[in-house]
Amino acid sequence: DAGVIQSPRHEVTEMGQEVTLRCKPISGHDYLFWYRQTMMRGLELLIYFNNNVPIDDSGMPEDRFSAKMPNASFSTLKIQPSEPRDSAVYFCASRSTGDTGELFFGEGSRLTVL
Amino acid sequence: AQSVTQLGSHVSVSEGALVLLRCNYSSSVPPYLFWYVQYPNQGLQLLLKYTSAATLVKGINGFEAEFKKSETSFHLTKPSAHMSDAAEYFCAVSKKLGAQKLVFGQGTRLTINP
């Protein structure tokens, strides 16, 4: 299996622009998670889905952030409009209900908002 | 609510020396505990996990961790550090096996001196 695939790996944008991050989970996994990693706050869970349905979005910072999972093999995290404080590494992770708790992470999308 | 505290954001050891990374957890119910490793510019990957079986858990790359309920600890150790162990290490906790949310500690950056 190719693992969790994220794109883009790096994104540099200007404040106010829309940013879309993409994730393809491991085939057969029914849970998908979006995390954000910063030096100041560490790893934060933003939102997670089960069978394409958002279950908990309490970690989404504000309305500028939105996430969708239109099908089992694709999810997006959108920031509109972006701000410099959104600069971070965004990770997507997936797992299967049958797994013993292990999350499989993508390599992350490093976002820089100027 | 579950939480973990990693003592020491940076740990530096000499090659061949003992590695000890500390993690204390807080949980109102029996926890499930994990250690993840993050190499530069990569996502997190599982090192080992405690799932209420043996209290001494062995993981990949020679690492192991011991669950001590009386001390609410799950410290990670390796008898002899190798240069390739340089990475960031995260302790994580969840309520139950397969629980949706994995709560991560702030991470400990391990540096290996030649």
Image (tube, rainbow, N blue to C red):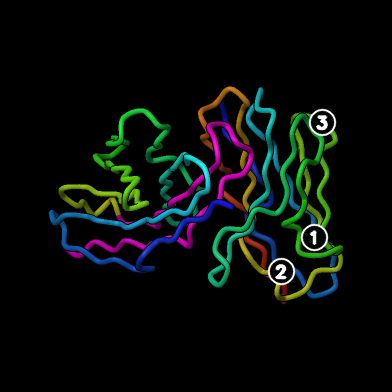
> Upstream in the sequence, badge 1 or badge 2?
1
- Mark 2 crowd level (few <14, some 14–19, many ≥20, 10 Å Cα): some
Residue at 73% across / 49% down in the picture?
A47
Q: Which residue is mark 3?
A: A71
Mark carried by residue B1? none
The spot of residue A31 in percent (x, y) is 68, 34
Mark 3 falls within which chain?
A
For residue B91: magenta? yes
Q: Amino acid at mark 1?
A: Val
Q: Nearer the viewer, residue A76 or B34?
A: B34
**How far apart, in angstroms, are the residues tagged by discs 1 and 2?**
10 Å
Question: Disc 1 and disc 3: Cα gap in Å?
Answer: 20 Å
Q: Which residue is mark 1?
A: A19
Q: Are the residues flagged by discs 3 and 2 in contact, CB closer than 8 Å? A: no
Q: Residue type at mark 3?
A: Asn
**Which image quarter is the C terminus of chain B in?**
bottom left
Pointer 1 or 3: first along the chain? 1
Foreground residue among A70 and A98? A98
Residue placed at 72% from the left, 43% from the top?
A: A48
Q: Position of residue B53 (x, y in %)?
A: 36, 28
**Where residue B97 sits: x, y (%)?**
53, 32
Residues rendered magenta in the picture = B86-114
**Left or right: B94, with B7 as reference point:** right
Kindly state the secondary structure of the residue where label 3 is placed. Answer: strand
